[in-house]
């Protein structure tokens, strides 16, 4: 019979290496001690995943903001040129 780990089998891209190592260390503990750490470990893993999601959202928002600023700068430049051309026509 194979023993399936209760800890998520995560690849390098999923969790930091330190958390994967911690899961292995917890799995090596006696059963009574494992239960004490499983809940805490689960909360840490969820926290890491939540922070990554938040970071991805922030990075996406910053990219959109940069694009919006480029459009605004272009619009401002065109508006200034139009203003200057109209001033020249009036003079």
Image (spheres, rainbow, N blue to C red):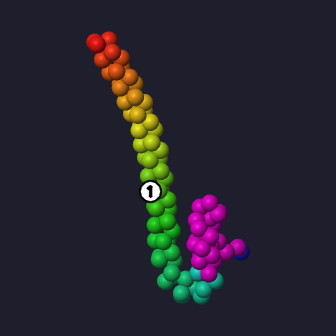
| Helix, strand or loop at mark 1 | helix
User: Looking at this rendering, what residue extends furthest in the left direction?
Assistant: 90
Q: Residue at x 50, y 59 (%)?
A: 52
* Magenta segment: 2-25
The residue under label 1 is 54
Q: Is residue 39 magenta?
A: no
Q: Residue at x 32, y 11 (%)?
A: 89
Q: Is residue 15 above or below residue 86?
A: below
The C terminus: image quadrant: top left
Q: Is residue 29 above or below residue 81?
A: below
Residue 69 at least partly seen: yes
Q: Residue at x 50, y 62 (%)?
A: 49
Picture quadrant where residue 34 is located: bottom right
Q: Is residue 16 magenta?
A: yes
Q: Is residue 62 above or below residue 75?
A: below
Could you tell whether 5 is left or right of 91 in the image? right
Q: Percent x, y for residue 31?
A: 57, 85
Q: How many marks?
A: 1
Q: Is residue 2 above or below residue 49?
A: below
Q: Percent x, y for residue 90?
A: 28, 12
71 or 44: which is nearer to us?
A: 71
């Amino acid at each position: 019979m194979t023993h399936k780990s209760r800890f998520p089998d995560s690849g390098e891209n999923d969790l930091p290496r330190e958390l994967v190592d911690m899961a292995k260390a917890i799995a090596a503990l006696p059963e009574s001690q494992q239960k004490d750490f499983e809940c805490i470990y689960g909360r840490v893993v969820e926290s890491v995943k939540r922070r990554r999601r938040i970071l991805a959202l922030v990075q996406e928002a910053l990219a959109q903001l940069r694009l919006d600023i480029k459009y605004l700068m272009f619009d401002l430049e065109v508006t200034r040129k139009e203003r200057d051309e109209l001033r020249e026509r009036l003079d």
